[in-house]
Amino acid sequence: MPLTNAERQKKHADKLKAQLGEEEYKKLMKIKNKNKYNKLKNISIIDKKDDVDEYVFVELKPLNKRINPLNKSKLNQETINKYLFTIKKIYFNYYNKEIIDDTDLLNVLQNKPYDLSKLVSLLSFVKNDLYKVIRNNHKDITILYAVITRIRNFAKTVRQLYPYIDQKQNIYNEKRCKKTPDDLIKQKMNALSFNIDNILSILNNPDLLLTDMEKLIIGLMLLFPTRRPVDYRKMLVVNFKPNIKDKNNYYFNNQFYFNITKNKDIQQFVVPEHLDLLIKNVIDKKQIDNNYLLLNENNKQFSSSGLSIFIMKTFQKVYNISISAVEIRRFYSTYLKNEVANGNLTEQEHRDISYKMNHSYEENKKYAY
């Protein structure tokens, strides 16, 4: 009996793992996923260079007030890996060599006991030559700040670095306010519709050959105020009322429970009828013991990059042009702004919908074109 597509892919993946080893295989997959993502977003992979950092360093006056206590917030593994990778990169940029022992660095990120003297020694270049570190790693200073605010004896460095974090955020906010859509963005905006009748027409169109999971993705992005995909990637389907202290997002009894969100809000919403039917259809047809709402073709939880690519491929299948989750959120914010301007939506309705998007009202207005 011939292998299914999923079985062929698994066989090929197992072969690569055996040849390369687990770590090298993961690196290869990361590069491949990044290339797929760039290709779907119409970015030339061959011509793409690292963005030119136009940042001009100016020495800023250190913060002149007491800083907050040590940051001991719990980090998830994905964030820990990202922080660790970034600090290693900053270290390499300064010394042109790798960190030999990252044990104490890893411990501080995991809120475990660490050897302060060793960690201070490891990051002494940040203390002693901070302005050079900022000049050469400006894109990564936010993560650097997040790490050193977790370590004792870095108070002076935190005060020196904070003004650059503030400056970076202000520049980002200004760019968001001044952004204008280019021709490609306009093409995507014109293709996408948030009209309920148009959305249902797409979902019921047999010629598109949409899978149940593709229909669900379209429903989640268009039939409910557009949220970040990670809110659904981490969502479990359960048959009990969730506790708000649980560190997961849930679907239960026609309702979404968002316990893990970017801005730490705990939210609960009734699921719209048409979207709820799509969810129940996927649940009813599920043949494996996996409680995640969204599963990839191997019936496993999507990775972050895997879900991003799946969303773009799904929308490309419908609109003949790939549209990312970030773009859909931005287009929806623009749609809301225009609806208010045209008198079809009140300010309070706009505020309520922004909250469902896990946005503040002001943030949502800035997010729009």
Image: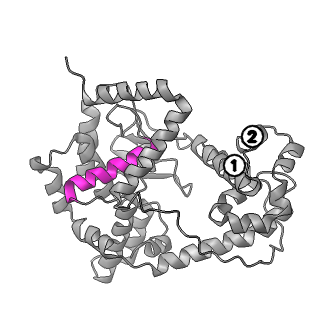
Which residue is painted at 22% across and 52% down in the image? 317
Dot 1 lies on which element? Answer: helix
Foreground pick, 263 / 78:
78
Viewer-side residue, 214 vs 324: 324
Tell me the number on the disc at residue 102: 2
How would you rate the neighbour count of disc 2 (Cα within 10 Å): few for under 14, some for 14-19, many for 20 or more?
A: some
Q: Is residue 158 left or right of residue 82?
A: right
Main secondary structure along the magenta-highlighted residues? helix
Numbered mark located on residue 275 in the image: none
**Where does the magenta region start and end?**
303-320
Residue at figure coordinates x 68%, y 68% from the top left:
165
For marks 2 and 1, the one nearer the N-term is 1
Give amino acid for label 2. Answer: Asp
Mark 2–mark 1 Cα distance, whole angstroms, equals 9 Å
Among the 4 quarters of the image, the one containing residue 67: bottom right
Element assignment for label 2: loop
On screen, residue 131 above or below 209: below
Q: Which of 163/37 is in front?
A: 37
Direction from residue 192 to residue 133 in the image, left or right = right
Give percent across and percent down for residue 5: 26, 30
In the rendered view, tell whether residue 159 sits above or below residue 344. above
